Each structure stands twice: as C-alpha cells, then as structure tokens.
Image (cartoon, rainbow, N blue to C red):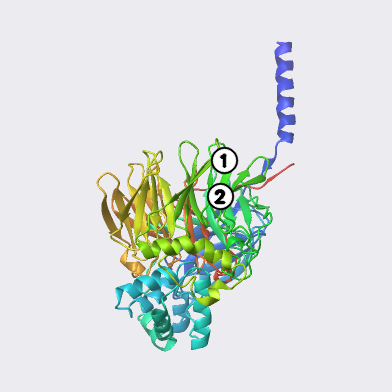
Amino acid sequence: MHSRLQTSGHLILFLLWSACLLPAIVSAAGFEGKVVTDVDTPIVGAMVTFRFGSPFQERTVFTAEDGRYQVAGLPPGVDHTIRVRRIGWHDIRSSESTSDLSSKQLDFTMERQTDPAKVAAQLPANHWYALVLERLTNESEREQLVRQCTYCHQQGSEATRIQRPLEEWHKVLALMARMGGGLDMEFRDKIVELFNSAYDHKTAVPRLTKGFDQPGFAPPPSEEARRAIIDEYQLGGRSSMQHDMIIHPDGHAYSVDMTTDTLFRLDPSKPDGGRESFPIPPGNQPLGGSLASGALPPNTDMRLGPHSLQAGPDGDVWITLAVGNKLARFDTVEESFVTEDLPGGVYPHTLRLDERGRIWYTIAVSNHVGVYDPKTGQHDVIRVPARNFAEEVTVRMIPIVLWLGQWFDIMELGSAGEDSSLPIPYGIDIAPDGGIWFSQLNAHRIGHIDPDTFEIRMIDTPFSAPRRMRFDSKGKLWIPGFSSSLISKFDTDTSEFEHIELPAELLGAETPYALNVDLATDDVWICGTNSDTLIRYQQGSGKFTIYPLPTQVTYTRDIDFSRDGGIWTSNSNTPAWQIETGIPRLIRLDVDGVIALPQVSSHP
C-alpha cells in the first residue's frame, strides 16, 4: 500500500512538472453585437471585418436576418480596427481592443448613403462593366474587349472607369499591349469613345443607382452565404503580384509573387500566420528576363516571373518561371531552390504533376506544352498544331522577335503585343486515366496529349476563351469560359459539352479566370474575378451560391482547398495599388463558419 501511494505521488508530481513545460493556451477573445438602422431595424448581410496584427490579418463575418453577428477566436489583448460595410449605407470604421477573454458586446447603427455617386462607387466592378458591354452589338468586338481588357485586372473598378483624353487613352492602350492584352487598330480607335461614354458619371450613376433608396436595391447575400467566414492575410506589398497559390499537403499555403520573384509561405496554424518569404535566385537573368524588350508591369524587379506552382510527391514545390524560361524546385525542408533551364519554348505558364511525378506545363507565347521527368532529367517540348499557316509563321517567329528586342523596343513598333491572335496554351490538368488536357485561350480550343506517345488531338470549344480547367471525381472536365460568362462540363468519352450560364445577378459581365473542383463533394468553385466574389456550383442540385468577398477589387486566380474545409485563393489584381488598401492578400473562405483561428500560447 505504501509503495502504491508513493508511486501515485511521484506520478502526480511528474504530471505537474510536465505541465509547466507545455505552453499554456490562452483563451481567444471575440465580439458579438447587432447592426441596425437608426430606427433599430436589423441590417441583413452587412460585412463586419476585424483587422489585427502586422502584417495584417482580417476576419469577416456577415450579419444574420436579425442583424446579429458574432466573431470568435480573435487574439486577446490586441487592438482591432473594425469596418462595417453594406452597399447603400455609410461605412463604419472604429477601433476596439480585446482586453479581456470574453466576447465584448459591440453594436453598430448605420446611416443610409444619400449620395448616388457614393452608392455607385460601392458597387463591384461588374456593375460598371455591364454598362460598357451593353453598348457593343458586334460580338467580335465584345469578345475582344472582354478577353483583352480584363486580362490582368478588373474592368469597371474605380481605377479603370476614369474618363481620359484621347492621348492618355492611347498611352494606356499601348501599355496594355506591352503586357500582352492587345486590340486591333480599328477597335482601339473605337474603344476610347466607348469607355468615356459608358463611364460618364452623368449617365452611369443614375443607371446604377436607380431605386437605391428602396429595400430591393443591392439585396443581401443568401442565407447560405451569410454563414461563411472570410479570412484575409496580407502578403507582399504594393509592387507585388501574388499570382497563384496552393495549399501544401503539410497545411502551409504557398504563393508566388510574380513581380518580385519571391515565394511566400503562410502557416494558417500560427496566430500571426507565420509568414516567410524566399527570394528566388535570379542568376544572370536581365530585368524582364526573356521579355527584356519592355513588356513589364510598373514598379517591378521581375527577372524570373514565378507564375504557377504545385507540390510534388516528395513535398517539394515546383514553379514555372515565366519570363525566366525555367522551372524551379523548392526544397521545403532545406528551403533552397534548384532551377531547370527549358530546352525550348517561351513563357512556361501553368503546371500540373501526373502520377509518375512528371511536370506538365503549358508554354503560352510559343504555343507548346512541355514535360519534365525529375527522375530521369528528360525534357520534352511538344509543339501544339497551329490553326493556319499565318499562325504557324507567327509563333515560329517569336524567338527572333524577342532576340531583336535586346536592341530595339519591339513593343513600340506595334508589331508585338497588339496581336491577340497568338493561340496561348493556358490551363492544363491531368485526367484520371492519365491523359493530359490543356486549353488555348485565344484559339478557343482544348487539346488532349497522349502521355506516352505525345500525340495531340485538338477540339474547338463552342464558347470563347477557355482558361484554367479541372477534372472532377467522375472524370468530367470543367472549363471556365473567361469571356463567355459560363462554365462548361466536357465529357472526354463523347466529346460533348454541357454549358451552365453563370447567375444572372452577375450581369453577364463576369470573367471567370479559373475554377477548381472539390473532389470530396464535386462542388465546382469558380473565380468571380470581376465581381469580388467566389462562386460555388453544386452539381447534385444545380445550385449556384455567390459568396461576396470583403475587399473591393479582388481579382482572384487559382483556387485550392485545405483539409479543414477552407476554400483558398489569392487577390492578384495587377497593378496591386488598385486593390483596396493597395496590398495583395491570400483569402480563405470557410463556408460553414467553423474554422477556428489558432489560439495564442504562452508559458506560465
């Protein structure tokens, strides 16, 4: 008996001593309250955003039918800036501190916005862009406008709907051509008057704000959307372009900053996001890389242009270096880079890995698809068939044009950048049977490559501008029509397309850049690139749900999923200064509002 009591005592002392070595978890704090009008009427669907930390993080919740909101899991003892936003109402901004560990009651009373111009300014870009599109009766011109003028940034946002004199417009269009978004010369002359008249506040504001003082104006998000929580993480700075991002199997988020040649890593399990940055060694690459003739965004130090990334079977991250004409491999343990020069082609774009661990990637400018086997070191570059002789000559001349660009500003000559007829191999994905499928953005085609023989079969799409596509669990290929305002399901066995139009409330002015399929549910998630949204399409019910995102000018790129149910993307508008706050973010959408923020720990 004595021995047993002594042993128990030792065990208790050991447990107490062990507890002292473990970090104590500090309970998280939060806020709750109600958002109402000055007559105490609930405001439904208001966004309540809490910002904290440096670099900042934001958590946004929506008010319910009774106007109530609740946000939990915020770090205690920290100052928070708070924004309450609802279209048609004055924004509310305030500061509060979570000085205790319980939820603080925080109510807000919003006032109606009575200035129509300020109400119109609250609307997402697609509302303004619809005013431009409705003036175009020529389908070819409409297609050209949508595909080229929203290539890298929103159209209809505050920075793009400025009325400009003719000479200033010509400068803007020339810069756009340098970046690859070219218009034919006849349409360039026409588009100046088109934008100036459509975005004229004297006519645009009354159109956009008709009935803004009535209950039906700018209805709240659906009940399903209002259950969501949105987390946004500042990443990079005003000269950044957070292009693609992925969720690594280890739970980290990785993002490539194209204009600063940097790989970022974010740890959502850490209270401060655990942000790290890894500059990619440029070697002897000149400014602009292979595009050194001047096709560069402003405020850039881009020599490699990291663009797309995926995790390999060993956990290493593979990256296309678009303007460097290389592949990069990042060892996530050693935190070091190794680069692979490409044997041919210009501008490696989107990459995916097959079951053999081979890297397949589109090569956008020179009309190729590449494949690299890390096990053998074998590189292959596959030329995609041209549509006609003229296109064949054009793409084969690209290396010569870029070589000349070392001595002459080819972009100023107007021969490069203004021709939107380059086919542009773009998205790529691997079918369940191992087949390789890719899209050609400007050629309005998709293609299949036999993974063993490299034989290519091309298929015209009955819609325009297929961009980044993905397979579902049943082997169906889902394709966004970037300038078509639709998504399409393609049956690889029958070669049949099934189109699904995007919801009418997107006004036909949405430009879905990419989509991805959550293989656990087969829900299709679509970028609301021009409407500050993410869009879910549920195959089983045929139902769309539109999730508003809190930051104005949210131009989303690729979409990925985390094991906790998060839907992730990046805000990649170029230039970044057009984004509200002028800084890119990574975004996590939690549809059920159940993902908790990591709690702060401390030693006693």
- Cα separation between marks 1 and 2: 29 Å
Q: Is residue 548 visible?
A: no
Q: Relative to the observer, which residue lies in front, 330 or 111? A: 330
Which of the pair 66/408 is nearer the observer?
408
- Residue located 32% across and 63% down the image: 503
From the top left corner, tell me how far across and down residue 527 is, in percent. 43, 59
Q: Position of residue 199 (x, y in %)?
A: 43, 83
Q: Residues within 10 Å of mark 1 (few under 14, many from 20)?
A: few
| Quadrant of the rendered image containing residue 531 | bottom left
- Mark seen at residue 342: 2
Residue 418's place in the image compared with 14, above or below, is: below
The residue positioned 43% from the left and 54% from the top of the image is 427
In terms of sequence position, does the residue under pointer 1 or pointer 2 come before the other?
A: 1
Asked whether residue 495 is in view, the answer is yes
Q: Amino acid at mark 2?
A: Leu
Q: Quadrant of the C terminus?
A: top right
Instruction: Name the kind of residue labelled 1 in the image.
Output: Asp
The residue beneath circle 1 is 250
Residue 23's place in the image compared with 177, above or below, is above
State the SS at label 2: loop
Residue 154 on image: x %, y %? 47, 70
Give above or below for 400 relative to 320. Answer: below
